[in-house]
Amino acid sequence: MTGYKNIGLIGASGDIGKIILDGLVASSSFNITILSRKESKANFPAGIIVRKSDFSDADLEVAFNGQDAVISAVGAAAFGGQKNIVNAAVRSGAQRFIPSEVSSNGQNETALKLTPFFGQKKALLKYLKTKQSDGISWTAIATSGLLDWLKGLQCYSTPKRPVTGTSTSRLLKPPRTRSWLYWKKQQGLNGL
C-alpha cells in the first residue's frame, strides 16, 4: 500500500502552515504544491511548486487536479471558506483532506464555549462526513490550545510545534486510515 504522494497545501506561509510545510519537506516523501494568494510575497523552500491562486472555485479545482491529498492550514478568518476548498478537492479527485483544525478540539463543547468561532470547525467536520460518499476521506488534527501565542503562557511551546508537522506527514503515509479526528491532548490543558 502506498501513501499519498502529491500534496496540495493552502496556508503554507501562516504560523501553522509553516510547521506543516516543514514536516512535509523533512519527510522527503512528497511532491508539494503550495497554493498562495496572488499578491503574496512569501518565499518557500526550493523544489516546492508554488501556484498563485485567486481561490475561486474553478481555480481551486484546477490547482487540485493531480493532488492525492489537500491540506488546509488557513487562519481563523478563512475557516468558513473551507467548504469551497473541500468541494474543489472532491471535484478534482483528491482522495484525502486535512482541514485547518490544528489547536483545540473544535468538537469539544468547552472549547466551543471559549472560542465560539470554532463552531465553523465543527460544521466543517460534519460537512466532511457528508462528502465521504463522494470518495474523499479526511483527518482533522487537534493538537490542543496554541496558548503560547498569548503573552506569558507556555502550554503549547515552540519545541512541541514540530510534532504537528511530523504528525501531519505521517498521517499521509501508509497505512491509510479512515476518516477521523486525531486529537493529541497536550499536558496541562485538561481536554481543551
Image (cartoon, rainbow, N blue to C red):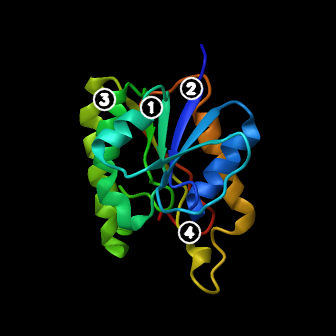
Q: Looking at the image, is mark 3 or mark 1 earlier in the sequence?
A: 3
The residues tagged by marks 4 and 3 sit, at their Cα atoms, a distance apart of 33 Å
Residue at x 33% of width, y 31% of height? 90
Q: Circle 3: is it few (<14), some (14-19), or many (20+) Cα within 10 Å?
A: some
In the image, residue 80 above or below residue 72:
below
The residues tagged by marks 4 and 2 sit, at their Cα atoms, a distance apart of 28 Å
Please tell me the numbered disc located at residue 4.
Answer: 2
Number of numbered discs: 4
Residue at x 45% of width, y 53% of height? 100
Q: Amino acid at mark 2?
A: Tyr
Q: Looking at the image, is mark 1 or mark 4 earlier in the sequence?
A: 1
Q: Mark 2 and mark 1 in contact? Answer it, CB < 8 Å.
A: yes
Q: Amino acid at mark 1?
A: Arg
Tell me the SS state at disc 2. Answer: loop
The image position of residue 59, as x and y in percent, is 35, 41
Q: Nearer the viewer, residue 61 or 170?
A: 61
Residue 73 vs residue 118: left or right? right
Please tell me the numbered disc located at residue 96.
Answer: 1
Tell me the SS state at disc 3. Answer: helix
